[in-house]
Image: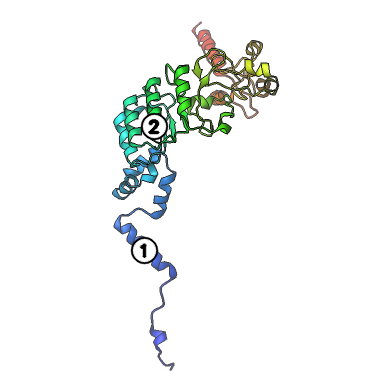
Amino acid sequence: MLPTTATASAPPPPPPSAAGTGASASASASGEPHAALILALGHMRLRELLACARACRGLRGAIAGDPLLWRRLVVEPPLSNRITDEALLALSDRARGTLRSLHLLGCPRVSDAGLLRVVQRNPGVTELFVPKCTGLTADGLVKIIQFLHECKGNLSRVRLHGICRMTNHHLDVINSLICRSSQHDAHALYYNHRVHEVLNTDDRRPIDVDVCPLCRNVRLVFDCTRTDCREVKDAWSRCRGCSFCVARCETCGGCIDLEELGETGLACSDFLCMDCWLKLPKCSTCNRPYCERHSNLKENLSPSGEFTCQECTAFATSFESLGDGD
């Protein structure tokens, strides 16, 4: 008979993961959000942050109590149409005066007075993006930018596309108040439909709008992407302008002359240059292509790539209905 020892009767030691599991279980039992979820909050958009704040009290307290999450406030669709002056002020107050970047992308219900209250409580704003905020005025924005300049003078980037009644005088005043770097002024702006929807945040220029050399209005002024236009000085100056003065290719952003417009018909409402038009598949009926932005409108798409545009499909349907009526 084998002797009984203390080691034989002692219980086996707990596995190394047991302590960690117990800590996680106690944290879950206490109702505190997991640490990984807290770290993920810094990578969420505004809509996602607001949704997480409604999940539980722990998340609501973590989101509302961390000013670092609100130093960069981006209001984009579909929240843009719902943000009012009071809501914007409440959101910006969560930064506790440390707001640095304010992007309002198409917020028609934000007024000059509401935006001024926000910057008065956050004078350290360095980026102010207000494209297509139709509730703002040029005079009000000049007053706001002047206030930021007098407080700290750190405002370095503004986006004003879509602000009504912006004149050359307004633009000159704003240019004089922005803290700028000469190397950013040399950056060109090339046409892209996304510029009109949500302004390109990779653009490092201090201000987005300029005086169009053709119509003399303050708008987005695009440079030509064609090599021959960029090499010839006179040609480059003629094809540099806003989208109202110079027709541009939806794909490459190059200028399009009147002769090309007549030869490069599309199944959608956009424009294409001849080089880009030749590369795209055409409708099997009318020989017109869709641009890349409207390629989802193709109908009767076959595995080989053949398709029918919506206009031809509608015409064929109406023709068949007339035949059935006879």
Q: Nearer the viewer, mark 1 or mark 2?
A: 2
Q: Nearer the viewer, residue 224 or 99?
A: 99
Percent x, y of residue 208: 51, 26
Amino acid tagged 1: Ala
Q: Are marks 1 and 2 in contact (CB under 8 Å)?
A: no
Name the quarter where the N terminus is drawn: bottom left
- Residue at 66%, 10% in the rendered image: 259
Q: Nearer the viewer, residue 136 or 41?
A: 136
- Residue at 44%, 20% in the rendered image: 170
Please name the residue that numbered disc 1 is placed on: 23
Note whether residue 137 is visible.
Answer: no
Task: Bin the neighbour count of mark 1 within 10 Å (Cα to Cα): few under 14, some 14-19, many 20 and up.
Answer: few
Q: Which residue lies most toward the top here? A: 326
Position above or below: 162 against 14: above
Amino acid tagged 2: Glu
- Residue at 33%, 59% in the rendered image: 27
Percent x, y of residue 289: 61, 20
Please name the residue that numbered disc 2 is placed on: 150
Where disc 1 sits, the SS reads helix
Left/right placement of residue 121 relative to residue 261 reads left
Which badge, 1 or 2, comes first in the chain's sequence?
1
Note whether residue 80 is visible.
Answer: yes
Percent x, y of residue 261: 62, 13
Task: Bin the neighbour count of mark 2 within 10 Å (Cα to Cα): few under 14, some 14-19, many 20 and up.
Answer: few
- Residue at 40%, 28% in the rendered image: 145
